[in-house]
Image (tube, coloured by chain):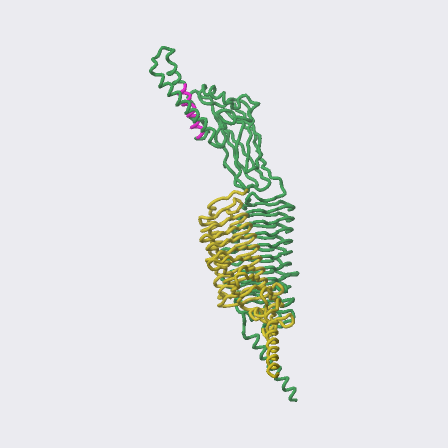
Chain colours: A green, B yellow
């Protein structure tokens, strides 16, 4: 009888202690969970708890929950700054739906270390961040969810993934974005493989990835995606492998901007393409990436042959297709123009990274004219200025020469120095005119490099210029001309043959 | 005769006492456990409870190993020692004080491995160097310290080395602070500095070499060189900081991407080997002060 009473008393005491333990809150900064623990325990080193949720209730903000030994520690909703560290024994959770949900304060720091978070059928996200200052996930494995890590805190925040494996998550390994503010993510020495998308940045998301692998994902290895709602999404890649995805890297913006910058990226064996752009999306290269496509610039035109009357403009629409990544802007030039003709492109360049685009080539010709031809229809200001200088030089040359050599015709020799001076000025002016022609980039006739039209009699022989000038205005001789258009980006170039017929 | 016996007894007793004491104090390898007791000899079967309790029983150049998870508290190191927590989750959780103070002899080598330092926002420095020849910090995590994660500032005339490998530093006032009146030489590889006010601050005549590391989300500076300090960094990421690299003294960069910072490069002494990525979405990218040829 006394024995029974004692046991009852003990039981009662135990209940009181247990209840006190749960309600209590003798919360500490260091708590422990164990596969053989009990949430009725105080989560101390010697009396560990059984679940992360149980331990969290007994852990002060800023504290640390340590995994003592292997176990299944269950779903947890994190509402404060906390570190969960399973480094020692790699704590695991296999949640039915969501793994870890973080709804902490705007300056709270949450660290998850050494965890295996494995989802099954019907699982939602491995780690969902609704609000936090910083979430740092180290040395962990997250697989089998919709999103491995969904980092889309409405007001933004920071995410660090260091040595994290994100695997076989049906939607994305990690998603980064923020409806308001900026979601900044740093991913280093991690692997995101076998997911729908390896790394996806959406509006408000800026992601820096270093020394990581994004391979074997069903759609993209890396995707910057902005929908019609607008906003900005950016991903910087440094030393990243993207292999065996459908598309290695893609930037897609229906509105706003989506940018992926590539440095030291190897994007190979992707089923569709090593990279792709859609909408306003841009994939930018630092020129040091390795792709398994042979880079090329292809130019084509739906109207490759134009016929004009001298003095008129011929316009050619030119489609530009680029295979591979270009690190420098695409610039255009033409050669093989006849005398008195110049070419210009609109726009003058296409931005680096362009996959497809269009420019319009305008070839301006010069009509034969007896009035000095100071106004050249369709010619740009530079060409007009050059033509004017050349014409003026010619007139001065003739006049000065007349004065300088006049003695033979019985004139006084006093005019000879003036005549010589005029000849000098004329020569200098003529040289300046020619220089202006050569220096006006792609918008001037390429007088100094007349090659390309060698099979055509009128194709811009320098020696013929004075003869042409004697006609008054460097007219474009009638004929059929083969013009070559060249598009160049860095070491890469492509060309297109066009025909110009001048009547 | 009795006197002689008494004396010899005393000698034996003294020897025993000393021997016992020495046996405890001079073990070359000691152990701590989350369920240990500092009254124990810190043996494998009778481990101690704290680093401070174990270090007094560990011989110079010896090693304290962590048997199982636990919080093992602050410790002052006055001799060559290795503390290795890689076998378990070895925590050093302090508030209002320093974590490990290194106050060793001029030739001593101190190694800290596999430790997790937690400062709870009030801890001073996780690792504070005062004296010693060389400090190795490997496989450690340091967070929440109000001063520095690692404070390595040798006194005048002192040459000292710090080797950091696989260190994860976050949420401290400053991450790694090196400088002082002496000549610190620092090597950092495969380490991360996140969300400190300053990731790495080199002052005085410190020479810092960094390889394969990341500086991210540091509010003021990712890396900051002052005085006549030099920082050389090869391969890495400097991202989402206030200013990525502030070169008030020499900083040389090679194969580094500097992106998503408010300001990428700043200061008048940032040298680039022409192989860095700066046009990478910084608010202001900035430009290197000089470009060094690769050869």
- In this rendering, the answer to whether B208 lies above or below A455 is below
Residue A413 is left or right of residue A312, and the answer is left
At 63% across and 84% down in the image, what residue appears? A8
Residue B150 at what x, y percent from top left? 51, 60
Outermost residue toward the bottom?
A1
Q: Is residue A325 left or right of residue A421?
A: right
Secondary structure, magenta segment, majority class:
helix
The answer to whether residue B35 is visible is no
Q: Is residue B236 visible?
A: yes
Q: Position of residue B147 (x, y in %)?
A: 48, 62
How many numbered discs, if any? 0
Q: Residue at x 60, y 65 (%)?
A: B62
In the rendered image, which quarter contains the C terminus of chain B? top right
Q: Is residue A217 above or below residue A394?
A: below
Q: Position of residue A503 (x, y in %)?
A: 52, 23
- Image location of residue B11, percent across then percent down: 60, 77
Viewer-nearest residue: B208 or B205: B205
* A491, A498: nearer the viewer: A491
Nearest to the observer: residue B220 or residue A366: B220
- Quarter occupied by residue A279: top right
Q: Quadrant of residue A305?
A: top right
From the image, which quarter does the N terminus of chain B lie in?
Answer: bottom right
Asked whether A252 falls inside the magenta stretch, the response is no
Highlighted magenta segment, given as a residue range: A382-397
């Amino acid at each position: 009888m006394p024995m029974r009473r004692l046991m009852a008393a003990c039981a009662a005491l135990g209940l009181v202690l247990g209840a006190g333990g749960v309600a209590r809150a003798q919360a500490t900064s260091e708590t422990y969970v164990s596969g053989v623990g009990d949430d009725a325990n105080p989560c101390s080193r010697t009396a560990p708890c059984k679940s992360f949720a149980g331990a969290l209730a007994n852990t002060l903000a800023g504290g640390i929950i340590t995994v003592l030994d292997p176990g299944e520690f269950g779903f947890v909703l994190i509402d404060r700054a906390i570190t969960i560290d399973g480094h020692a024994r790699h704590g695991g959770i296999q949640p039915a739906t969501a793994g870890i949900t973080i709804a902490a304060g705007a300056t709270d720091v949450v660290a998850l270390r050494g965890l295996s978070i494995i989802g099954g059928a019907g699982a939602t996200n491995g780690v969902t961040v609704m609000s936090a200052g910083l979430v740092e996930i180290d040395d962990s494995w997250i697989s089998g969810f919709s999103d491995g890590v969904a980092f889309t805190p409405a007001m933004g925040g920071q995410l660090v993934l260091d040595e994290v494996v994100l695997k076989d998550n049906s939607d994305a390994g990690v998603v980064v974005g923020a409806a308001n503010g900026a979601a900044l993510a740093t991913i280093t020495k991690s692997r995101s493989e076998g997911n729908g998308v390896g790394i996806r940045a959406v509006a408000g998301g800026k992601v820096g990835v270093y020394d990581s692998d994004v391979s074997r994902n069903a759609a993209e290895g890396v995707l910057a995606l902005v929908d019609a709602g607008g906003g900005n999404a950016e991903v910087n890649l440094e030393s990243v492998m993207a292999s065996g995805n459908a598309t290695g890297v893609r930037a897609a913006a229906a509105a706003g901007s989506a940018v992926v910058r590539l440095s030291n990226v190897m994007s190979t064996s992707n089923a569709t393409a090593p990279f792709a752009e859609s909408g306003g999306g841009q994939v930018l290269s630092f020129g040091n990436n390795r792709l398994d496509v042979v880079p090329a610039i292809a130019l084509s035109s739906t109207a490759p042959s134009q016929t004009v009357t001298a003095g008129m403009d011929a316009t050619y629409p030119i489609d530009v297709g680029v295979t591979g990544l270009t690190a420098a802007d695409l610039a255009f030039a033409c050669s093989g123009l006849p005398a008195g003709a110049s070419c210009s492109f609109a726009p003058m360049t296409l931005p680096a990274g362009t996959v497809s685009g269009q420019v319009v080539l305008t070839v301006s010709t010069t009509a034969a004219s007896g009035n000095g031809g100071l106004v050249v229809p369709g010619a740009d200001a530079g060409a007009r200025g050059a033509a004017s200088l050349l014409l003026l030089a010619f007139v001065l040359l003739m006049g000065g020469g007349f004065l300088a050599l006049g003695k033979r015709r019985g004139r006084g020799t006093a005019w000879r120095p003036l005549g010589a001076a005029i000849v000098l000025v004329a020569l200098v002016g003529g040289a300046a005119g020619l220089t202006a022609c050569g220096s006006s980039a792609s918008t001037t006739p390429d007088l100094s490099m007349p090659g390309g039209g060698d099979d055509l009699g009128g194709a811009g022989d320098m020696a013929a210029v004075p003869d042409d000038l004697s006609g008054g205005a460097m007219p474009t001789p009638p004929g059929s001309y083969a013009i070559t258009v060249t598009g160049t980006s860095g070491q890469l170039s492509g060309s297109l043959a066009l025909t110009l017929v001048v009547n | 005769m009795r006197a002689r016996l008494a004396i010899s007894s005393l000698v034996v007793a003294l020897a025993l006492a000393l021997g016992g004491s020495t046996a405890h104090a001079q073990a070359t390898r000691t152990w701590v456990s989350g369920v240990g007791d500092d009254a124990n000899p810190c043996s494998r079967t009778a481990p101690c409870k704290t680093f401070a309790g174990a270090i007094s029983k560990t011989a110079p150049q010896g090693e304290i190993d962590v048997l199982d998870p636990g919080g093992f508290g602050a410790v002052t190191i006055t001799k060559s020692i290795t503390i290795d927590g890689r076998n378990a989750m070895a925590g050093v959780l302090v508030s209002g004080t320093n974590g490990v103070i290194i106050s060793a002899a001029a030739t001593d080598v101190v190694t800290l491995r596999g430790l997790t330092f937690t400062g709870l926002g009030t801890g001073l420095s996780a690792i504070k160097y005062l004296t010693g020849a060389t400090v190795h910090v490997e496989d450690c995590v340091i967070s929440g310290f109000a001063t520095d994660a690692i404070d390595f500032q040798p006194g005048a005339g002192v040459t000292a080395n710090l080797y950091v490998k696989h260190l994860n530093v976050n949420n401290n006032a400053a991450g790694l602070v090196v400088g002082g009146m002496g000549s610190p030489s620092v090597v950092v590889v495969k380490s991360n500095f996140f969300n400190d006010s300053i990731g790495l601050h080199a002052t005085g005549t410190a020479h810092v070499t960094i390889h394969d590391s990341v500086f991210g989300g540091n509010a003021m500076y990712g890396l900051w060189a002052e005085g006549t300090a030099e920082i050389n960094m090869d391969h890495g990421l400097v991202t989402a900081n206030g200013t990525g690299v502030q070169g008030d003294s020499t900083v040389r960069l090679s194969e580094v991407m500097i992106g998503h910072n408010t300001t990428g490069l700043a200061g008048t002494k940032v040298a680039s080997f022409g192989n860095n990525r700066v046009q990478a979405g910084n608010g202001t990218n900035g430009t290197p002060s000089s470009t060094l040829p690769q050869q």
